[in-house]
Amino acid sequence: KGQAELAGTPALPLVSANLRASQLRLPGQLAVASLALRGELKADAASPFQLLLDASGVQSGRLAVEQLHARADGQRLHHRLQLDGRFRLDAHAYTLALAASGGLPAASSQWRGMLEKLTLTGTPGVRLLAPAALEIGPARQRLANARWAALGGSVQLAEWLRSANGNVSSRGQANGLH
């Protein structure tokens, strides 16, 4: 229920949406009790945008999302992303908090920025100790200079890289994990 407008081109889309749904049943055994999406995205890179997503009661196989809140705002060249949620995987309960900032350079589909916060509580839990460089797009996914607290120790990830052909490489070190 709601309204959405999609215009422009794939390279410069214009999106305006205010949608709500409840008791959704989708292919692949995906069920959503409640979903709300609100946002504005203008075609030009300098225009401000804001997207908000709230979901609860999401079930897909072994994953049950109790609550999820996502927010993105800023401009294409520089914006902030936040994600918070509570979920269960099998019988294990987790909370997730993520914050990132960055942008899409002109004429590029590679998002570049910083992963500022990532905390996953539960067993096992992990916590990002300092901001880390992050790049995501069709050409590659890359995380660099990431320091983590995990499994009673620490992990220093100099680089994790997945190239467009699917090859994955990483380098770093771990200490005191148990």
Image (spheres, helix red, strand yellow):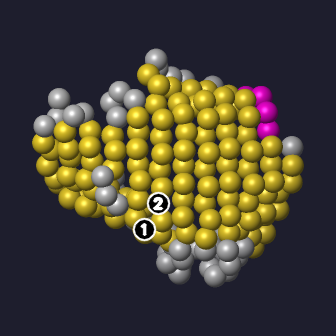
Q: Which residue type carries mark 1?
A: Gly
Name the residue tied to disc 1: 113
Name the residue tied to disc 2: 100
Q: Is residue 37 left or right of residue 135?
A: right
Q: Is residue 82 magenta?
A: no
Viewer can see residue 19 = yes
The residue lying at 78 percent from left, 69 percent from top is: 7
Please determine whether, in this image, residue 176 is positioned above or below residue 10: above
Q: Quadrant of the C terminus?
A: top left
Q: Is residue 169 left or right of residue 165?
A: left
Q: Earlier in the sequence, mark 1 or mark 2?
A: 2
User: Magenta residues, as a range?
Assistant: 21-25
Q: Nearer the viewer, residue 103 or 163?
A: 103
Measured in 3D between alpha carbons, the distance from the residue under mark 1 to the one under mark 2, in whole angstroms, is 7 Å
Q: Are marks 1 and 2 in contact (CB under 8 Å)?
A: yes
Please determine whether, in this image, residue 103 is positioned above or below residue 172: below
The residue lying at 40 percent from left, 29 percent from top is: 122
Q: Residue furthest top?
A: 91
Q: Secondary structure at mark 1?
A: strand
| Percent x, y of residue 82 | 54, 54
